[in-house]
Amino acid sequence: MERRPYLIDGRRARVLRVMRYRYASPRMLRRNALFWGGAILVAGIAIVFAWAANEATHLFGRAIAGRPWLPFIVSPLGLAVSVWLTRTVFPGAQGSGIPQTIAALHIDEAPLVDRILSLRIAAGKVCLTLLGLLCGASIGREGPTVQIGAAVMHTLGRWARTPSLELQRALILAGGAAGIAAAFNTPLAGIVFAIEELSRSFESRTSGVVLTAVIVAGATSLAVLGNYTYFGTASAALPFGVAWFAVPLCSVAGGLLGGLFSRALILAADGWTGAFGRFFGRRPVAFAVACGLALAALGAASGGTTYGTGYEQARALIAGTAHLPAVFAILKLLATVVSYVSGIPGGIFAPALAVGAGIGATLAQLVPSAPVGAMILLGMVAYFSGVVQAPITAAVIVLEMTDNQTVTVALMATSALAFAVSRVVCPHALYGALAERFLLAQKVRVDRLD
């Protein structure tokens, strides 16, 4: 049968009209511009937040220099004020921010999501995390940046009146991924983190939103800060042979300690039992004071190295310019547990990487054939994988933060083995378990998230 030209032209015209309506209509262009602007805004907030966190850490360090008694006053008082503000002014701002973001992805009630991811909570997260660093808490700002990014993108989605629940969740996912990408200047890690940890799935219809947000946020961070690596450049290699004994050694140590750390936080989230639990359960501010005293004692025992994010200690270990005591990793781990269970806002990413670096530096004495720098990287990825139980994210984030591809296979093997060891100690992923408990506290019924 002969085709009629006017019918072909008519079909083509209809296709072109649909394409223009979907992808080039003024409404879609305005919406995309709003989302791209949101990704830029997330990156800008992450950059300013990082600068402020560094200044807060340095200010605390200068304040206590030559005054070893000062943390015993500042830390208890600061943690008490932070907990009081969290409970009275910014309820819902406590914790890392990642469990709250995961929880928001599993909630259908819009008003509850709006409350969890409000700009007010995001602002409180910034202010109270900085307050925690000003009083020496062992916390990071990367986890809070995830919730802040999710809150910004969710709010923009509300303003743009996103039509579907699926797109609203995609924006939350994109905001969290953009926050990680901008916080560490690691775009690939941001994407992998969104897939492996935040959603634990990857819907094809949401992939474009996530990828676009991460690309825009990463480009903004690159334009402002340049092509820097979070921990500098590490050139250490791990020669194949006896030196590879470092892989199972770091995997077991990092996975075991990471699993114990996660299990401790999950048990704390379930609530303290006995007379101790009843006393401090009714007096959260008094408990924060006790945590502040414990934090100061750990700081005194470590020579002040357990305070703050741990970024400078990890970077110095990687660069080979510092030699920390063998107990640094354990003391930093305990300081992070104390800081988290006190009830203040703050993340665990940077402290976890510092603990891992300390583990690697300590274990390097047992494997003299392995370069110390490579051992530190293996310790970082092992402990980080043991804590978050996201082995791909752990390997990618350490690779991007140190710009070292020579140990890629060793890092991935260590991350996978540490994940397996951690699962034996702590059967449930930390962030998924904390998200479940957060949802139960909000009286939202959920299936297991990990």
Image: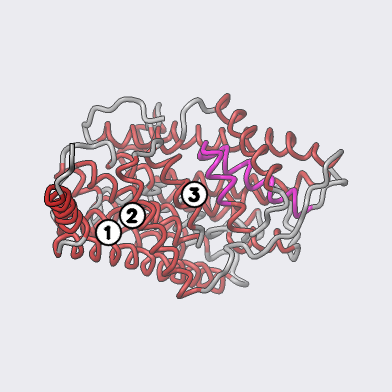
When the figure is inspected, residue 372 is found, relative to residue 434, above or below; the finding is below
Amino acid type, callout 3: Ile
User: What residue is pinned by disc 2?
Assistant: 175
Q: Nearer the viewer, residue 97 or 223?
A: 223
Q: Nearer the viewer, residue 191 or 154?
A: 191
Amino acid type, callout 1: Val
**Picture quadrant of residue 100:** top left
Q: Nearer the viewer, residue 117 or 188?
A: 188
Quarter of the figure that contains the C terminus: top left
Query: Residue 411 vs residue 75: left or right?
Result: right
Q: Secondary structure at mark 2?
A: helix
Q: CA distance from mark 3 to mark 1?
A: 22 Å
Q: Which residues are magenta?
A: 372-397
Query: Residue 349 vs residue 156: left or right?
Result: right
User: What residue is pinned by disc 3?
Assistant: 348
Using the image, tell me which numbered label, if any, was put on residue 152: 1
Q: Residue at x 55, y 41 (%)?
A: 392
* Circles 1 and 2: CB atoms closer than 8 Å: yes
Query: Residue 221 vs residue 20: left or right?
Result: right
Q: Position of residue 254 (x, y in %)?
A: 65, 39
Q: Position of residue 135 (x, y in %)?
A: 46, 62
